[in-house]
Amino acid sequence: MVKASKSKSKARYESKAKPKSKSKSKSKSKSKSKSKSKSKSKSKSKSKSASKAKAKKKAVSSARASRAPSRPRSRVEARPEISTLTAAAPVAAADGPVATITGIAARSAIACFDWPERGVAPIGYIKGMAVVFARMLCKLRAGDDAAVEMAKKNTGNAGKDVLAHYKEVFRGLGMSNDVDGADTLRHLFVLMVGLGMRESSGKFCEGQDRHAPENQTAEKAEAGLFQTSFDARSASPLLPELFARFTANPAGLTNTFREGCPPCTARNLENFGTGPGRDFQKLSKDSPAFAAEFAAVTLRNKRSHYGPINRRAARVMPDCDAMLREVQDFVEASPDGVCPALM
């Protein structure tokens, strides 16, 4: 093929340089057509032989497949795929109460909301807060003191109670907190979801705020989802009780909150000081459920502990209320079937 192209280019060059005789052009055109036909026949025969070989190979492989017994898939192939798509249908209750609750959270509008200056929350944060709320509904039903404290109606003390401080915000959204009970508890958790996004972007293991080095002590170091510090415990006698209870049995839902969360760094996990204050920092990061319960009681008794609350920068989102309302309906429809799995 290389020689043919060289002869062609030479012929073109010579045709420009001097006129050709008719006999020469005829003989060249004949030789060209012969070479073309030869190359065509060669390519045809090649393609035919290739297709025959291919067909033969296919027949052999299919014959082998029919004779050989089917092999089990390797472990890698057998591993189930993890889908990032949210199912349109509700998660079946047969999968278990926690699976149902996390399914409600995963397909909710708040799960994909782009929080101003924070972005979309880690999906584990939305799921985790939904499960903690469901657990608190069960505790409220059982008469748990901390749950009762969280669910009490607006006290009217705007200096201490977050529901009084946010009264106009809740009123504007048609979310009344004038009665003790599950609805008031739900509204508190709606606000807490917004607070957690302001304080930690939903990162359960968030450590001390390095912009405030003066707080790097056992008493004042902020820790966890809501950046609560140990000195908040004076707000209510229920807070030291919660600390003692979770220290004995963390039950923190860490695996739920971990989903989609950025890695916990050594800087996040560093704790300051010694003694119970240091232990509080560690527990707040190891047990996000503890961090949520402790913050909920603090918000009802010392809302000034949280800067975003004081500035009303923590957002109350109706989409979050809709998600938690669905969780509430699920729990209240069958509390005896749901609560034992959550407690």
Image: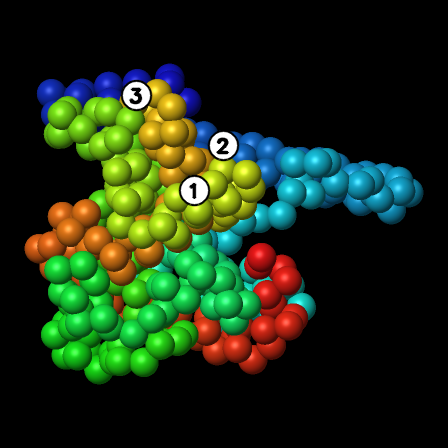
Sequence-wise first label, 3 or 1: 1
Q: Is residue 243 left or right of residue 74?
A: left
Q: Residue furthest front?
A: 237
Residue at the disc numbered 1: 243
- In this view, the residue farthest toward the left is 311
Q: Quadrant of the N terminus?
A: top left
What residue is pinned by disc 3?
273
* Residue at horizontal 59 percent and vertical 38 percent from the top: 47
What percent of the width, then of the height, locates residue 224?
Answer: 33, 39
Hey, what amino acid is under mark 1?
Phe
Residue positioned 49% across, 38% down in the render: 247
Of residues 94 and 232, the one nearer the viewer is 232
Is any part of residue 107 visible from this angle? Answer: no
- Label 2: which residue? 39
* Crowd class of label 1 (few under 14; some 14 to 19; many from 20; radius 10 Å): many
Q: Residue sitting at 30 percent across and 37 percent down?
A: 230
**Looking at the image, which residue is at 54% across and 35% down?**
43
- Quarter of the image where one finds residue 269: top left
Q: Earlier in the sequence, mark 1 or mark 2?
A: 2
Q: Nearer the viewer, mark 1 or mark 2?
A: 1
Instruction: Say if 63 sits above or below 168 in the image.
Output: above
Query: Spatial distance from mark 1 to mark 2, Cα to Cα?
Result: 88 Å
- Which amino acid type is marked by label 3? Gly
* x, y percent for residue 140: 48, 68
